[in-house]
Image (spheres, helix red, strand yellow):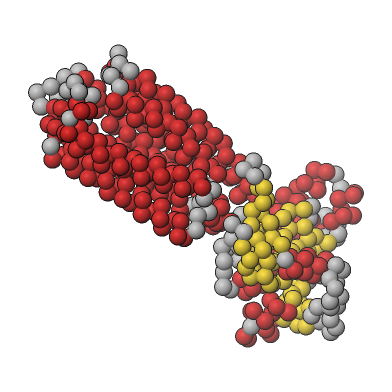
Amino acid sequence: MAQTGDILTSLFAIGMASSFLIADPRSPTSRALSATLGLASVSMFLNVPFEVGVFARDPRIWSRLFATTETAALVAGFEWVLRVRRIGTATETERRRGERLLRVAQGLAILYGVTCLAVPQLRADYFSPSSRPGAVFRPQFYLFAVPLGLALGLAGVAIVQVFRTEPDPSEGLRLNAMALATPFLMTGFFAPPRWRPVTTGIGEVVFLAGAIRYHVLQGQRGQFLARFLSPQVARLVRERGLPATMQQSRIQLSVVACDLRGFTPFAESAAPEEVMELLREYYDTIGAVVSAFGGTVKDLAGDGILCLVGAPIPYADHARRAVDMSLRMRERGGEVLSRWRAMGLDLGLGIGVASGYVTVGVLGGSERLEYAAVGPPVNLAARLCARAESGQILVDQRTVGLVGGSDRSRFERLAHEETLKGLSRPVVIHELTS
């Protein structure tokens, strides 16, 4: 019965390891966690030949095998916690302090493993399921218990620090589930063989509950990333975590706003299916252009699209990227609209570009997220877009200055400064010609 339970708990662990790796192969935290669960499953499986007497003649073989996989699982587990720390909101000082704790914990785990390999018979006699009666009162027991206990203790302190510094929400779910499951998993190590599968299984189920919630939250996040962020940014979020990638900050970037001319009369007279078809083509085309230049779609509102160039991924040449992106938008958008013009529809595209300092960051809770950008360039780009005629790209003075050099010949300054709606001061406006 115990052997069957060990096989089932081992298969359960390897199943979870595989699911994390398959579902999120690019995530450093998922890879480390998959390694932890995979190695732990091997350790569980090794109990089967030990219980049926395969290693009866020489338990030192089992002791060495078990210690190797157990130590590797501990090192991988501490590495997982370390990677979770890196994608949270901890300061650099807090991050370094936590990493030192976890590196020491890994060192102690390796020391425990080396000790087990050096004196496997002592390990089999005093620190295994078949330990001698009263082994806990013998000094040989503490030769193994002290480094292992210190390693787990330091890791526990590091986990507490992670929760104090607001970890990535989805990773926090897995970490919290593992913290709740660990007492059951560790009890399984010391429990009698017939109870070991029960306590280990309870620990695995507790962790599975957190893992399911993790996947649900990752799915919701995936929808958010697909809607607002370019593939490059989405990949960065998977690697660094959402809080670290998109934490609130004040940066200089460029904003590009575009919308359709003639859309309102078209929407009033056309069938809803035709309106949806136009918007779908329009969004897909502009979205592909934004992704190609490393931009981020901030808002989609009817026929209006607002894009950021320089956040969350900063670019020193954000102004030049924004200018080149607006030209590509006009080109590709014109191709889409030309097909609709052939049907007798008077549709066009106007674009506004502005640069400056804005505050960006994610707003909302774990269930609903919005990427916000607040600052004068956002409003200015929208006003320039509203001022632009069909086929025009209007650019503010700061963007022209940031582009600089010989590229200034691409801009033609409008005759007079203008006071745009919602702005208190007149602005210098340039038209991008090529």
Q: Where does the N terminus fall, quadrant-wise? A: top left
Q: Is residue 63 visible?
A: no
Q: Quadrant of residue 306?
A: bottom right
Answer with the quarter of the image where residue 46 lies: top left
Measured as percent of width and height from the top left, residue 275 is found at 80, 48
Q: Is residue 201 visible?
A: yes
- Where residue 211 appears, as percent x and y from the top left, is 49, 34
Q: Write the residue at 42% across / 50% down.
A: 83
Nearer the observer, 152 or 412: 152
Which of the pair 369/256 is nearer the observer?
369
Residue drawn at point x = 32 percent, y = 47 percent? 105
Q: Is residue 364 above or below residue 248?
A: above
Residue at 21% across / 20% down in the picture?
51
x, y percent for residue 244 = 53, 55
Left or right: residue 168 compared with residue 45: right
- Picture residue at 87% right of the left edge, 48% below the top: 270
Judging depth in this view, the residue of 178 and 328 nearest the camera is: 178
Q: Position of residue 276 (x, y in %)?
A: 77, 46
Which residue is at the far top?
Answer: 1
Q: Is residue 323 above or below residue 344?
A: below
Q: Nearer the viewer, residue 339 or 267?
A: 267
Q: Is residue 350 above or below residue 276?
A: below
Quarter residue 358 falls in: bottom right
- For this orientation, the residue located farthest to the front is 137
Relative placement, left or right, of 184 versus 121 is right
Q: Which corner quadrant holds the C terminus?
A: bottom right
Q: Is the residue 349 above or below the residue 39 in the image? A: below
Count numbered badges in the picture.
0
